[in-house]
Image (spheres, rainbow, N blue to C red):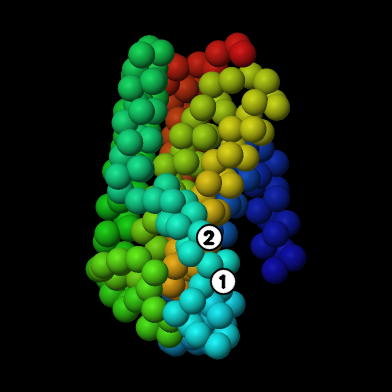
Amino acid sequence: MRELIRRAWEVGAGMDRVVFLSIIAVVGGGWLFLAIADEVVEGESARFDEAVLLMFRNPENPEDAIGGPEIEELIRDLTALGGVAIISLVTISAVVFLIMDRKGHAAVLVLLATVGGQLISSGLKAYYDRPRPEIVPHLMHAARGSFPSGHSLLAAVTYLTIGALLAQMVTQRRLKVFILGVAVIITMMVGVSRIYLGVHYPTDVLAGWTLGFIWATLCAQVAQWLRQRGMVEQAIDA
């Protein structure tokens, strides 16, 4: 293992630091997703999944989520941020903004990233075909497969991709941190909301986050590669 790490570091020494870290993130994320999927297929994640789901419910009555009706309504609003309707609205808004700002290539990249994320989600749901949780009642309607969480995946893909792209278009570090921070927080809230509502296992959400992060990282690197070749618009002063 030490020798492998040393060789990887030597290879990375001759590369751009961001590119090297992105490769490590993608490889590590891929390994993590496969590890989660293996645990799910083998049924070894059941105890963990059930324990976390029950954490969000009244021990005396699993039909009641902690926090009461007001919190349930708030969580439903948050989970909508990862739904097809809101994701489509955010994507279209970002695309229109980029086009109006004369960043047409960036707009196309955002659109392709989101559509690609949807295809990845649909394909993997069909492949794994994991049933929805039954240990607790669902607090909202949910259809199709459970693994990976489509809301979590799409939230990560959309918000992280748009966040990374916008962060590359500003020069001030504090603006970059703010943009990426908001993207990460929204992505996390969507994932946790799916567990709270009982429509996804925690491993579904972790897998969705992981895949979304991988796809967003790849899209960000494609944007950077195209930008260096003058095919995606350069950063602006802000």
Residue 126 visible within the image: yes
| Image quadrant in which you'd find residue 222 | top left
The local crowd at label 1, few if under 14, some if 14 to 19, many if 20 or more residues have their Cα within 10 Å, is some
Residue 135 position in % (x across, y down): 43, 85
Mark 2–mark 1 Cα distance, whole angstroms, equals 8 Å
- Which mark is drawn over residue 66? 1
Q: Amino acid at mark 2?
A: Ile
Residue 85 position in % (x across, y down): 30, 44
In the rendered structure, the answer to whether residue 139 lies left or right of residue 14 reads left
In the rendered structure, the answer to whether residue 236 lies left or right of residue 137 reads right
Mark 2 vs 1: CB contact within 8 A: yes
| Secondary structure under the numbered disc 1 in the rendered image | loop
Q: Which residue is mark 2?
A: 71
| Secondary structure under the numbered disc 2 in the rendered image | helix
Residue 126 versus residue 27 in the image, above or below: below
The front one of 64 and 232 is 64
Residue 157 position in % (x across, y down): 43, 46
- Viewport quadrant of the C terminus: top right
Residue 116 versus residue 237 in the image, above or below: below
The mark nearer the N terminus, 2 or 1, is 1
- Viewport quadrant of the N terminus: bottom right
Q: Residue at x 34, y 17 (%)?
A: 99
Q: Residue at x 35, y 43 (%)?
A: 86
Q: Which residue in the rendered view is the most extreme toward the front?
A: 69
Q: Amino acid at mark 1?
A: Ile
Q: Residue at x 67, y 20 (%)?
A: 172
